[in-house]
Amino acid sequence: MALQLIAYAVVMSLLSALVGLGASRYRALLRLACFPLLGLSGLAAAAGGLLVLTGTAVAAQLPLGLPWLPWSVRADALSGFILLLIGVVVFAVAVFGPGYVREFQHGRHSLAALGVFTGLFVAGMQLVVIADDAFMFMVAWELMSLSSYFLVAFQHENAPNRRAAFLYLLMAHVGGLAILLGYGVLAAFGGGFGFDVLRAAELPPLWAGVAFALAFFGFGMKAGLVPLHAWLPEAHPVAPSHISALMSGVMLKVAVYGFVRVTFDLIGTIQVSWGVIVLLVGSASALLGVLYAMQQSDIKRLLAYSSIENIGVIFMALGLAMIFLAAGQPLLGSLGLIAALYHALNHALFKSLLFLGAGAVIQQTHQHSLEHMGGLLKRLPYTGTFFLIGCISIASLPPFNGFVSEWLTLQAALQGVVLESGVLRIVIPVAAAMLALTAALGAMLFVRLYGIAFLGQPRTRQSRQARLPSRGMRAAQALLALLCLLLGVTPAIVIDVMGAIPQALGGLPEPGITGQGWLWLTPVAPAVASYSAPLVLLGLGLAWGLFYLLLHGPRQKRVRRIHAWDCGFGPLSPRMQYTAASFSMPVRRIFQPVWLLDERVERITDARSQRLTGLRHQLQVGDRSWAVLYEPIGRWVLAAARRVARLQSGNIRTYLSYSFFTLLFLLWLIT
Amino acid sequence: MADYLNLQGWLLALLQTALFVTAAPLLVGWLRLLKARLQNRRAPALTQPYRDLSKLFRKEVIVADTASPLFRAAPYIVFSATVVTAAVIPLIAVHLPTAAIADVIVLVGFLALARFFLALAGLDVGTAFGGMGSSREMTIASLGEPAMLMAIFTLTMTAQSTNLSHAIDFLLAQGLVLRPSFMFALLALLLVAVAETGRIPVDNPTTHLELTMVHEAMILEYSGRHLALMEWAAQLKLMIYGVLIANIFFPWGIAAELTPTALLLGLAVIVLKLMLLCAVLAVAETALAKMRLFRVPGFLNLAFLFALLGMLSHVILEVGA
């Protein structure tokens, strides 16, 4: 049953791609057929994933692939969980899409490209998760990478978009190469490509380390870990918003899946040093991601940098899990793993919600910069409310879902005292403090995003005239917002279901977070820590209700609305408000060395009277990783290419002599 | 978790919360009285904060016409998040059923939730002051929160529980042990508390000078009952930090069992502790001047450093020793 559902899901998304071919001629086909098929695919994937997660693993062999190497698929609890995540977000995107693509309906963009590659992209992600041999995994992985390249390049008439797409393609392939080599190392010791063979392979510690490093590099690049993240804030924002939601919400989780699959499942025996590396890289990504996000004014770029932050948090939890597993604490290892995967699910939901919200805002205002928005909550009340829920969730505030995973991660970190090594006992709490700093800065980031874009007064005419987005777009956001609340209030139920995942990864124990019933989360033991989200929500509601009733008695006067106090100088103008750049100015000053800042203030004076008539403030925020890592590598590659190019004189006689000497050399070799 | 259906416990917890919430203005009154005496001024009555609140509750509410619905919801959210925080902190007794609902990390989360909406409300009307206040408040908080959590982690690692009630119980059972880590953690928490509750030298609760205000700038547009709720929440926050410091670092006297004598003793002891803490704060506020905004990061870095030292001395000196 589960297997059939998953098969339906893949077939539906492929069918959606096929139907998309016709959209170049019949433009309505995209809205009327492609998205509904995609929605069905999402539903089937979610249902299949849930069945696998609550039931048993399923496997099959496909009549595809090479004659001696048939493709095999298998879905265990981990695959089921990620399939569920993919399915939910794909369904929401399919509900959102028809209203959103109206914008492209009469443009010169190829709707066929959008339809075909969206379908292939979704199919690719679903296939990666159920692949049971390295060969099929790589094929599906490339399908996912390549089709998303075309989606990033969708609006290719802008040169920056083409550049972003090329960068994405390049990085995806460097990463893909590393993953392929990683599987190669495993296959060399296992003698086959099936995951069951790779799992059984006995690797000497050095080669296991090599395989881990390659996998970490490859999957980390796809997930956008610092310093391999440079493509992510370029590529994610330039795709259409529903694709950004899929890329940030889902594709990054597929990379997390790949890392967990290879490290926890295939390699199996984890070394402590790997865990420390993952923890440190995760901390750096989390902190730098949020700091970079803080200085962005483009709403989608900001969200993309925030994805780096959240991926960092996921990898921090994974690093903790690896350290505990290597130190012989499987219970705590499972706790870290559950925290990481729960955060992955949460991030998929709220990041898709925020990207869809950003898409609705951009469709209505045609503005990308926060500096041109403002007052949108009044004009887009539904989008504004759902976006607020997304912001609270991602800022990890109780009682929403982001807080639960962050709390679990901190609880795992606090158990670092059980470790033998004194260094680790210090490193882990400091990493936990980094996580706290990240969370606090994240709250500031989303106050900035929401406060500037949705509150205050509109800063441009377009923002003032924004109108309600279509019903489907609102419904998709409502669904995701509701799920954010549900996962925040009833985490025990979800985590109880997720308990099967550690079991599937080499028989780790269930962490027993939900041992006290559905009301309570009690990692480790009830006396050590407990959190009851339903009771918290009840308490908040009671306090609110009580004081609301007390203050709204029969004798209460009505609220009077007048203009805000303007110190007697005449009406307040929107230009007097704080801007996004001024909001984050204190942080810019405190953490100055983090960015490459180019800040200029230009004084505009009247030519005749020499009086100051205005000031122009310009701020460019550059990513330091370019200067430190990418540009040197780029220069080195170009220099090497120039050396090699000396061979190419353009003279046919030289080329013939190359061939001749090569032939001689080969003949000498075989004699 | 087994005793969370205990009715008597819930009643006591509710009473304790009500006491917490109603006593918060009194604490501020006491602080103002002390400060006035120290500065050779005539002191307002101890109950002045109550009179101010009741006056505000009776006044007409004026809302700017640029404000969104969030502006009117924010005071309720801020206030109820702060009340829930107060509900989970052991004030006069440990082992009340509310303590298990949320541990100390969740408590920091509640305060962050209140701050989130406070800062959003500051941005909502679209005046320059509100945005300025929000930006500053969030900056200060984002530097203060890690220091606070780090100090708390030192405590929870010692007590091996993030549950406040269990941690205090553990410390009581240990008796009087001088821990270097706790000294540093106490210093860190004191500095963070000053910053988070907006006291001198970080912020001045009595100023409305544009260049210096932080908390006041955010609530500038509020009036009537909305303002009253915001003010009350701020007073409650001061009391929350006071009780946290008093009961974590000097837990002696808190009621360990739920008998009338123990509860009365607990009440007397916490009143005494808070009065003393307020005296320390009043002296500090009288002696110090408010610092420039960009000196505040240095102040909070010092707090973080203390917290880190506390953590290190715990790991190096105390674990296994």
Image (cartoon, rainbow, N blue to C red):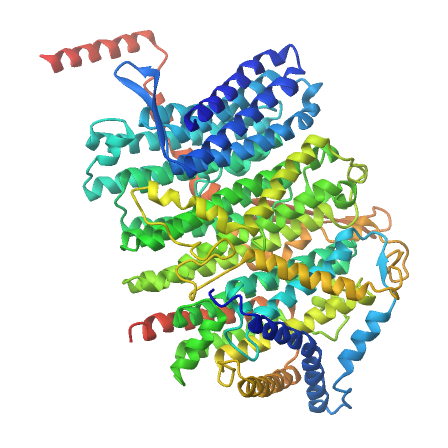
Q: Between residue A559 and residue B253, name the one nearer to us.
A: B253
Q: Is residue B306 visible?
A: no
Query: Which image quadrant for residue B246?
Result: bottom right
Task: State which quarter of the image contains the C terminus of chain B.
Answer: bottom left
Q: Position of residue A486 (x, y in %)?
A: 58, 47
Above or below, B231 relative to B74: below
Q: Nearer the viewer, residue A648 or A609?
A: A648
Q: Residue at x 53, y 63 (%)?
A: B101
Q: Is residue A120 above or below residue B118?
A: above
Q: Position of residue A151 (x, y in %)?
A: 55, 25
Image quarter of residue B269: bottom right
Residue A63 to residue B12: above or below: above
Residue A189: x and y, percent? Answer: 20, 33
Give the camera-side residue of A579 and B111. B111
Give the percent coordinates (x, y) of residue B88.
57, 69
Residue B162 versus residue A257 in the image, above or below: below
Q: Residue furthest left?
A: A671
Nearest the eye: B264 or A433:
B264
